Image (cartoon, rainbow, N blue to C red):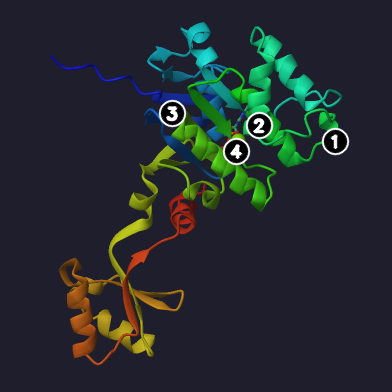
Amino acid sequence: MGVSAAPPVLRTRALSKSYGKRLAVDRLDLEIGHAELFGFLGPNGAGKTTTIRMALGLIAPTSGAVEILGHDVRKHRAEVLPRVGALVESPALYGYLSGRDNLRAFGDLLGGVSRRRIDEVLEIVALKGRERDRVKTYSMGMKQRLGLAIALLNDPELLILDEPANGLDPAGIVEMRDLLRGLVAAGKTVFISSHVLSEVQQICTRVAIINHGKLIRIGTVSDLVQAPGEYEVKVDSPVELLAALRLQTWASNARAEDGYVVTSAPEGRGRDLIKFLVENGHNPDSVSPRHRDLEDIFLSLTADEKR
Ligand SMILES: Nc1ncnc2c1ncn2[C@@H]1O[C@H](COP(=O)(O)OP(=O)(O)OP(=O)(O)O)[C@@H](O)[C@H]1O
Ligand SMILES: [Mg+2]
Protein backbone atom coordinates (compact mmCIF):
# COMPACT_ATOMS: atom_id res chain seq x y z
CA MET A 1 0.00 0.00 0.00
CA GLY A 2 1.40 3.35 -1.01
CA VAL A 3 1.49 6.32 1.27
CA SER A 4 -0.36 9.14 -0.41
CA ALA A 5 1.95 12.06 -1.14
CA ALA A 6 1.13 15.40 0.43
CA PRO A 7 -0.38 17.82 -2.08
CA PRO A 8 1.84 20.66 -3.29
CA VAL A 9 1.80 23.65 -0.97
CA LEU A 10 0.92 25.90 -3.89
CA ARG A 11 -0.30 24.85 -7.30
CA THR A 12 -1.64 26.84 -10.21
CA ARG A 13 -3.48 25.04 -12.98
CA ALA A 14 -3.66 26.74 -16.36
CA LEU A 15 -4.11 29.94 -14.42
CA SER A 16 -5.10 32.88 -16.61
CA LYS A 17 -6.22 36.43 -16.12
CA SER A 18 -7.17 38.96 -18.73
CA TYR A 19 -7.93 42.62 -18.28
CA GLY A 20 -10.02 43.43 -21.31
CA LYS A 21 -7.95 42.30 -24.26
CA ARG A 22 -4.70 42.20 -22.32
CA LEU A 23 -3.69 38.77 -21.12
CA ALA A 24 -1.86 39.48 -17.85
CA VAL A 25 -1.39 35.80 -16.89
CA ASP A 26 -1.44 33.15 -19.55
CA ARG A 27 -2.12 29.48 -18.64
CA LEU A 28 0.39 29.33 -15.85
CA ASP A 29 1.19 25.93 -14.33
CA LEU A 30 3.30 25.94 -11.19
CA GLU A 31 3.83 23.46 -8.38
CA ILE A 32 5.64 24.42 -5.22
CA GLY A 33 6.51 21.79 -2.63
CA HIS A 34 6.93 21.85 1.12
CA ALA A 35 9.81 23.95 2.48
CA GLU A 36 10.77 25.31 -0.90
CA LEU A 37 12.05 28.83 -1.25
CA PHE A 38 10.65 29.57 -4.65
CA GLY A 39 11.55 32.60 -6.76
CA PHE A 40 8.98 33.99 -9.16
CA LEU A 41 10.79 36.21 -11.59
CA GLY A 42 9.82 38.50 -14.39
CA PRO A 43 10.29 42.05 -15.63
CA ASN A 44 7.85 44.84 -14.80
CA GLY A 45 4.37 44.03 -16.05
CA ALA A 46 5.13 40.30 -16.45
CA GLY A 47 2.14 39.27 -14.34
CA LYS A 48 3.73 38.52 -10.97
CA THR A 49 1.44 40.60 -8.78
CA THR A 50 -1.61 39.49 -10.74
CA THR A 51 -0.66 35.85 -10.14
CA ILE A 52 -0.10 36.50 -6.44
CA ARG A 53 -3.43 38.30 -6.10
CA MET A 54 -5.16 35.29 -7.62
CA ALA A 55 -3.23 32.94 -5.35
CA LEU A 56 -4.51 34.88 -2.36
CA GLY A 57 -8.08 34.92 -3.63
CA LEU A 58 -8.00 38.74 -3.91
CA ILE A 59 -9.03 38.63 -7.56
CA ALA A 60 -10.74 35.91 -9.56
CA PRO A 61 -8.92 34.12 -12.39
CA THR A 62 -10.44 34.45 -15.85
CA SER A 63 -9.84 30.71 -16.13
CA GLY A 64 -7.82 28.06 -14.35
CA ALA A 65 -7.39 27.66 -10.61
CA VAL A 66 -5.08 27.98 -7.64
CA GLU A 67 -4.78 25.33 -4.96
CA ILE A 68 -3.08 25.90 -1.65
CA LEU A 69 -2.31 22.87 0.53
CA GLY A 70 -4.67 20.87 -1.66
CA HIS A 71 -7.64 23.24 -1.47
CA ASP A 72 -9.06 25.39 -4.20
CA VAL A 73 -8.51 28.94 -3.02
CA ARG A 74 -11.78 30.32 -4.41
CA LYS A 75 -13.88 27.53 -2.96
CA HIS A 76 -12.16 27.11 0.39
CA ARG A 77 -10.95 30.59 1.28
CA ALA A 78 -11.79 30.30 4.96
CA GLU A 79 -9.81 27.09 5.34
CA VAL A 80 -6.84 28.14 3.29
CA LEU A 81 -6.16 31.77 4.12
CA PRO A 82 -5.41 31.32 7.85
CA ARG A 83 -2.52 29.07 6.79
CA VAL A 84 -1.03 31.69 4.47
CA GLY A 85 0.87 34.87 5.21
CA ALA A 86 1.25 37.50 2.52
CA LEU A 87 2.94 40.75 1.71
CA VAL A 88 1.68 42.24 -1.54
CA GLU A 89 3.30 45.40 -2.83
CA SER A 90 3.54 48.00 -0.05
CA PRO A 91 1.59 46.97 3.03
CA ALA A 92 -1.12 49.41 4.16
CA LEU A 93 0.26 50.35 7.55
CA TYR A 94 -1.16 52.78 10.10
CA GLY A 95 1.45 55.55 10.11
CA TYR A 96 0.26 57.21 13.30
CA LEU A 97 0.48 53.95 15.29
CA SER A 98 3.63 52.33 16.60
CA GLY A 99 4.99 49.17 15.03
CA ARG A 100 3.73 47.16 17.97
CA ASP A 101 0.25 48.71 17.76
CA ASN A 102 0.15 47.97 14.04
CA LEU A 103 0.85 44.32 14.84
CA ARG A 104 -1.86 44.38 17.49
CA ALA A 105 -4.35 45.95 15.06
CA PHE A 106 -3.60 43.42 12.32
CA GLY A 107 -3.67 40.67 14.93
CA ASP A 108 -7.18 41.74 15.91
CA LEU A 109 -8.23 41.24 12.29
CA LEU A 110 -7.03 37.66 12.64
CA GLY A 111 -9.14 37.24 15.74
CA GLY A 112 -6.49 38.28 18.24
CA VAL A 113 -2.82 37.42 18.57
CA SER A 114 -0.94 36.98 21.83
CA ARG A 115 1.55 39.51 23.12
CA ARG A 116 4.12 36.77 23.05
CA ARG A 117 3.60 36.15 19.33
CA ILE A 118 3.94 39.88 18.68
CA ASP A 119 7.25 39.85 20.55
CA GLU A 120 8.35 36.83 18.54
CA VAL A 121 7.66 38.38 15.14
CA LEU A 122 9.28 41.66 16.20
CA GLU A 123 12.32 39.60 17.10
CA ILE A 124 12.26 37.68 13.80
CA VAL A 125 12.21 40.84 11.68
CA ALA A 126 14.67 42.66 13.94
CA LEU A 127 12.40 45.57 14.88
CA LYS A 128 12.90 45.13 18.61
CA GLY A 129 13.92 48.45 20.08
CA ARG A 130 11.93 50.43 17.50
CA GLU A 131 8.54 48.85 18.11
CA ARG A 132 7.25 51.82 20.14
CA ASP A 133 8.07 54.39 17.45
CA ARG A 134 5.38 55.58 15.11
CA VAL A 135 5.47 53.81 11.78
CA LYS A 136 5.50 57.09 9.85
CA THR A 137 9.00 57.63 11.25
CA TYR A 138 10.18 54.25 9.91
CA SER A 139 12.50 53.90 6.93
CA MET A 140 11.27 52.06 3.84
CA GLY A 141 13.15 48.93 4.89
CA MET A 142 11.66 49.02 8.38
CA LYS A 143 8.16 49.31 6.91
CA GLN A 144 8.91 46.37 4.67
CA ARG A 145 10.06 44.36 7.68
CA LEU A 146 6.96 45.33 9.62
CA GLY A 147 4.88 44.15 6.65
CA LEU A 148 6.69 40.84 6.88
CA ALA A 149 6.06 40.69 10.62
CA ILE A 150 2.33 41.13 9.92
CA ALA A 151 2.49 38.32 7.36
CA LEU A 152 4.09 36.10 10.01
CA LEU A 153 1.60 36.83 12.80
CA ASN A 154 -0.55 33.76 12.23
CA ASP A 155 2.52 31.52 11.95
CA PRO A 156 1.63 30.58 8.34
CA GLU A 157 2.76 27.42 6.56
CA LEU A 158 3.06 29.31 3.28
CA LEU A 159 4.43 32.80 2.93
CA ILE A 160 3.75 34.69 -0.30
CA LEU A 161 5.83 37.82 -0.66
CA ASP A 162 5.55 40.20 -3.59
CA GLU A 163 8.92 41.91 -4.10
CA PRO A 164 9.98 41.67 -0.44
CA ALA A 165 13.32 43.29 -1.19
CA ASN A 166 11.70 46.47 -2.53
CA GLY A 167 13.16 49.50 -0.86
CA LEU A 168 15.78 47.57 1.07
CA ASP A 169 19.41 48.63 1.02
CA PRO A 170 22.11 45.99 0.40
CA ALA A 171 22.41 45.25 4.11
CA GLY A 172 18.63 44.99 4.35
CA ILE A 173 18.59 42.55 1.44
CA VAL A 174 21.16 40.37 3.18
CA GLU A 175 19.05 40.44 6.35
CA MET A 176 15.92 39.58 4.40
CA ARG A 177 17.73 36.63 2.81
CA ASP A 178 18.84 35.30 6.18
CA LEU A 179 15.37 35.75 7.54
CA LEU A 180 13.76 33.84 4.66
CA ARG A 181 16.37 31.09 4.87
CA GLY A 182 15.60 30.76 8.56
CA LEU A 183 11.87 30.43 7.86
CA VAL A 184 12.47 27.71 5.27
CA ALA A 185 14.82 25.91 7.63
CA ALA A 186 11.97 25.97 10.15
CA GLY A 187 9.77 24.15 7.64
CA LYS A 188 7.89 27.06 6.04
CA THR A 189 7.33 27.34 2.32
CA VAL A 190 8.21 30.71 0.86
CA PHE A 191 7.17 32.09 -2.51
CA ILE A 192 8.79 35.40 -3.44
CA SER A 193 8.52 37.51 -6.54
CA SER A 194 11.22 39.76 -7.86
CA HIS A 195 12.30 41.53 -11.00
CA VAL A 196 15.89 41.62 -9.76
CA LEU A 197 17.44 38.21 -10.14
CA SER A 198 20.54 38.82 -8.10
CA GLU A 199 18.29 39.31 -5.08
CA VAL A 200 16.89 35.81 -5.21
CA GLN A 201 19.56 33.88 -7.07
CA GLN A 202 21.46 32.97 -3.92
CA ILE A 203 18.59 31.73 -1.83
CA CYS A 204 15.97 30.11 -4.03
CA THR A 205 15.72 26.36 -4.33
CA ARG A 206 13.92 26.84 -7.65
CA VAL A 207 12.93 29.73 -9.81
CA ALA A 208 10.31 30.33 -12.48
CA ILE A 209 10.76 33.05 -15.06
CA ILE A 210 7.67 34.61 -16.58
CA ASN A 211 7.18 37.24 -19.23
CA HIS A 212 3.93 38.56 -20.72
CA GLY A 213 2.13 36.27 -18.30
CA LYS A 214 3.72 33.12 -19.69
CA LEU A 215 6.06 30.69 -17.99
CA ILE A 216 9.33 30.78 -19.90
CA ARG A 217 11.57 28.67 -17.70
CA ILE A 218 11.42 26.80 -14.44
CA GLY A 219 14.16 24.94 -12.62
CA THR A 220 16.90 25.14 -10.05
CA VAL A 221 19.19 28.12 -10.34
CA SER A 222 22.06 25.84 -11.30
CA ASP A 223 19.94 24.23 -14.05
CA LEU A 224 19.26 27.64 -15.47
CA VAL A 225 22.76 29.04 -15.32
CA GLN A 226 24.41 26.09 -16.99
CA ALA A 227 24.47 26.49 -20.76
CA PRO A 228 25.37 22.90 -21.65
CA GLY A 229 28.16 22.19 -24.03
CA GLU A 230 29.63 25.67 -24.20
CA TYR A 231 33.10 26.69 -23.14
CA GLU A 232 34.82 29.98 -22.79
CA VAL A 233 38.37 30.22 -24.05
CA LYS A 234 40.91 32.91 -23.28
CA VAL A 235 43.55 33.34 -25.98
CA ASP A 236 45.93 36.05 -27.17
CA SER A 237 44.41 36.27 -30.64
CA PRO A 238 40.68 35.68 -30.45
CA VAL A 239 40.05 36.87 -34.02
CA GLU A 240 42.23 34.13 -35.52
CA LEU A 241 40.75 31.54 -33.22
CA LEU A 242 37.23 32.55 -34.19
CA ALA A 243 38.07 32.27 -37.87
CA ALA A 244 39.50 28.79 -37.29
CA LEU A 245 36.56 27.66 -35.17
CA ARG A 246 33.99 28.79 -37.69
CA LEU A 247 35.40 26.31 -40.19
CA GLN A 248 34.53 23.47 -37.79
CA THR A 249 31.05 21.97 -38.02
CA TRP A 250 30.90 21.58 -34.22
CA ALA A 251 31.62 25.25 -33.58
CA SER A 252 29.21 27.04 -35.88
CA ASN A 253 27.96 29.17 -32.98
CA ALA A 254 31.44 30.34 -31.92
CA ARG A 255 31.49 34.00 -30.95
CA ALA A 256 33.36 36.60 -28.95
CA GLU A 257 31.82 37.60 -25.64
CA ASP A 258 33.20 39.57 -22.71
CA GLY A 259 36.78 39.09 -23.87
CA TYR A 260 36.35 35.34 -24.28
CA VAL A 261 35.78 33.14 -27.28
CA VAL A 262 32.64 31.16 -26.55
CA THR A 263 32.27 27.90 -28.39
CA SER A 264 30.89 24.39 -28.35
CA ALA A 265 33.35 21.50 -28.19
CA PRO A 266 33.69 18.50 -30.53
CA GLU A 267 30.87 16.19 -29.40
CA GLY A 268 30.62 18.33 -26.31
CA ARG A 269 33.96 17.12 -24.94
CA GLY A 270 36.10 19.80 -23.32
CA ARG A 271 39.29 17.79 -23.62
CA ASP A 272 38.83 17.49 -27.38
CA LEU A 273 38.39 21.23 -27.58
CA ILE A 274 41.67 21.72 -25.73
CA LYS A 275 43.35 19.25 -28.05
CA PHE A 276 42.03 21.14 -31.07
CA LEU A 277 43.27 24.44 -29.68
CA VAL A 278 46.75 23.17 -28.91
CA GLU A 279 47.18 21.23 -32.15
CA ASN A 280 46.20 24.29 -34.14
CA GLY A 281 48.52 26.65 -32.33
CA HIS A 282 45.91 28.61 -30.38
CA ASN A 283 47.46 27.93 -26.99
CA PRO A 284 44.75 28.88 -24.52
CA ASP A 285 45.34 30.73 -21.26
CA SER A 286 42.19 29.09 -19.96
CA VAL A 287 39.30 26.92 -21.07
CA SER A 288 36.30 26.61 -18.79
CA PRO A 289 32.68 25.47 -18.99
CA ARG A 290 30.52 28.49 -19.51
CA HIS A 291 28.29 29.63 -16.69
CA ARG A 292 25.96 32.43 -17.37
CA ASP A 293 24.74 34.84 -14.83
CA LEU A 294 21.09 34.36 -14.13
CA GLU A 295 20.75 38.03 -15.03
CA ASP A 296 22.05 37.34 -18.58
CA ILE A 297 19.69 34.43 -18.99
CA PHE A 298 16.83 36.50 -17.75
CA LEU A 299 17.64 39.27 -20.18
CA SER A 300 18.07 36.95 -23.13
CA LEU A 301 14.90 35.03 -22.28
CA THR A 302 12.79 38.11 -21.82
CA ALA A 303 14.30 40.41 -24.47
CA ASP A 304 13.34 38.44 -27.56
CA GLU A 305 9.64 38.66 -26.99
CA LYS A 306 9.07 42.35 -26.52
CA ARG A 307 5.76 43.31 -28.04
N1 LIG B 1 -6.28 46.18 -12.37
C1 LIG B 1 -5.75 46.12 -13.59
N2 LIG B 1 -6.42 46.56 -14.67
C2 LIG B 1 -5.88 46.47 -15.91
N3 LIG B 1 -4.68 45.97 -16.18
C3 LIG B 1 -3.96 45.50 -15.15
C4 LIG B 1 -4.44 45.55 -13.80
N4 LIG B 1 -3.50 45.03 -12.99
C5 LIG B 1 -2.48 44.67 -13.79
N5 LIG B 1 -2.74 44.94 -15.08
C6 LIG B 1 -1.87 44.66 -16.23
O1 LIG B 1 -1.49 43.30 -16.16
C7 LIG B 1 -0.13 43.14 -16.53
C8 LIG B 1 0.62 42.45 -15.40
O2 LIG B 1 0.71 43.33 -14.29
P1 LIG B 1 1.34 42.90 -12.91
O3 LIG B 1 1.09 44.01 -11.96
O4 LIG B 1 0.83 41.56 -12.55
O5 LIG B 1 2.87 42.80 -13.28
P2 LIG B 1 4.12 42.58 -12.32
O6 LIG B 1 4.89 41.43 -12.89
O7 LIG B 1 3.69 42.49 -10.92
O8 LIG B 1 4.98 43.91 -12.58
P3 LIG B 1 5.90 44.78 -11.57
O9 LIG B 1 7.28 44.16 -11.58
O10 LIG B 1 5.92 46.12 -12.23
O11 LIG B 1 5.26 44.79 -10.22
C9 LIG B 1 0.38 44.51 -16.88
O12 LIG B 1 0.32 44.68 -18.27
C10 LIG B 1 -0.58 45.44 -16.18
O13 LIG B 1 -0.70 46.65 -16.86
MG1 LIG C 1 4.12 43.62 -9.23
Q: Amino acid at mark 4?
A: Glu
Q: Is residue 89 visible?
A: no
- Left or right side of 306 for 98: right
Q: Which of these two is toward me, 174 or 291?
A: 174
Q: Which of these two is toward me, 222 or 145?
A: 145
Is label 1 in a helix, a strand or a loop?
helix
Residue at mark 1: 137
Task: Choose the circle earlier in sequence order: 4 or 1.
Answer: 1
Q: Residue at x 61, y 44 (%)?
A: 175
Mark 4 close to ligand 2, CB under 8 Å = yes
Residue at mark 4: 163
Mark in the foreground, 4 or 3: 3
Residue at mark 2: 123
Mark 1 close to ligand 2, CB under 8 Å = no
Residue at mark 3: 187
Mark 3 close to ligand 2, CB under 8 Å = no
For the N terminus, which image quadrant? top left
Tag 3: Cα neighbours inside 10 Å, few (<14), some, or many (≥20)? some
- Where residue 223 appears, as percent x and y from the top left, is 33, 50
Task: Choose the circle earlier in sequence order: 1 or 3.
Answer: 1
**CA separation, marks 1 and 3?**
34 Å
Q: Residue at x 38, y 90 (%)?
A: 236
Mark in the foreground, 1 or 3: 3
**CA separation, marks 2 and 1?**
19 Å
